[in-house]
Amino acid sequence: MRRREFLQISAGSIAVTALRGIPQVPERPALRELAGAKNLLVGSAFSFAQMARPEMAALLAQQCSIMVCENELKWGPTQPERDRYEFEHADAMVVFAEAHGQKVRGHNLCWHQSNPAWLETTITPGNAAALLRQHILVVAGRYRGKIHSWDVVNEAIHLEDQNAGGLRNSVWLKNLGEGYIELAFRAAAEADPGAILTYNDFGMEHDAPDQERKRNAVLGLLRGLRARGAPVQALGIQSHLTAHLDPPRFHELHGFLKELGKMGLRVFITEMDVDDRDLPADVAKRDRMVAGLYRDYLRTVLAHDHVRAVLTWGLADRGTWLDAYHPRGDGQKKRPLPFDAELHAKPAFAAMCEAIAECPARSEERV
Ligand code: G3I
């Protein structure tokens, strides 16, 4: 039996056997059912390791209509050496999603992080365009027709670097200038003309001067790309939120989302989680405040028809990247996601269900 066939069978059987063992989710329709009724996609990032945990696989299959590989499609894992590509884990994860009728987001084709060591030492202004283009043609080409949307360029804006347009210092900007972004989108369109090509970034959600400046820089980037005819069709708003005793406000986000709609762009909430590092230690209180932020934020973004997908950055607290990012002062694990480490639904899950159940249905024409 060829490895690929083995992976296909194992991915499919993981979900089937585990569905029998899934922890009881409270008597609520699954997120994917609630969202499907509104022509909305809902899902989560997942890892190969999580997919191999039967009860986790079953919960992902039950709740999600769209998935994204947390790390397996980044440059480092897919092209560990200049002339070697690795797709075993990503292949199995795409098979898992297809086996469960789930769409797949690709993340990501061009970033300042998660690049393999060989790239940082090999790249020059003379070979950078070819390296970037080849990577995108190979990786996006491999999954042609299988990817709902690609995060083609991730986190290119970083105002603190004080470059023109607010662009972030990176191996790409250094070797190619700002044109690397358009190059990446054009290569992605060539590799997979059916995927929705997305620019993905963070730090533009809250009512705050720095986030307003970032929103304006992102709009400037998108308008420039569109003016040059670059094939960018969506913005990914990562939505890594931080809960505070005084809950953040999202009024300015409405204007931003309206501007994106006027440009004919779809919007995806791509990596939502709620960092509770500043909240009290009491778990019940923390969970309630985190749920309140899920509810407020989702009510805000789902009021806009062109918001077409909501993904959390993980479905359960176990293994969240946030535990390594500004750990809580009291040493407690963070509780940023809809399910706890034992896969029991939390108030944040109920908040997501309620926000999706009460939001207007998406109009069909933007499917
Ligand atoms: O797989 C290797 C393993 O072989 C090795 O032993 C281990 C120790 O070095 O590292 C493992 O790779 C780690 C990888 O996660 C898989 O666990 C990398 O070091 C680590 O840097 C990587 O962190 C990821 C991070 O992006 C950087 O790629 C996080 O899991 C992931 O949640 C985070 O996700 C990002 C999005 O891609 C973009 N938006 C922000 C978000 C949070 O930072």
Image (spheres, grey):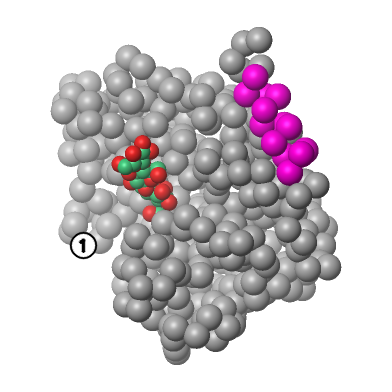
Q: Is residue 237 above or below residue 55?
A: below
Residue 211: name its quadrant. bottom left
Residue 7 within the magenta-colored segment of the rendering: yes
Q: Is residue 29 above or below residue 167?
A: below
Q: Which amino acid type is shown beneath numbered disc 1?
A: Glu
**Secondary structure mainly formed by the magenta segment:** helix
Q: Is residue 27 above or below residue 121?
A: below
Q: Residue at x 25, y 37 (%)?
A: 172
- What is the crowding at mark 1: few (fewer than 14 residues within 10 Å), some, or many (at least 20)? few
Residue linked to disc 1: 160
Position of residue 27 measured from the top left corner of the image (x, y, whole percent): 83, 68
Q: Is residue 339 left or right of residue 86?
A: right
Q: Is residue 314 left or right of residue 166?
A: right
Relative to the observer, which residue lies in front, 180 or 310?
310
Relative to the observer, which residue lies in front, 357 or 163?
357
Position of residue 114 measured from the top left corner of the image (x, y, whole percent): 32, 40
Residue 123: name its quadrant. top left
Q: Which residues are magenta?
A: 6-18
Q: Residue at x 69, y 52 (%)?
A: 59
Secondary structure under the numbered disc 1 in the rendered image: helix
Q: Residue at x 53, y 80 (%)?
A: 283
Q: Residue at x 61, y 32 (%)?
A: 94
Residue 54 within the magenta-colored segment of the rendering: no
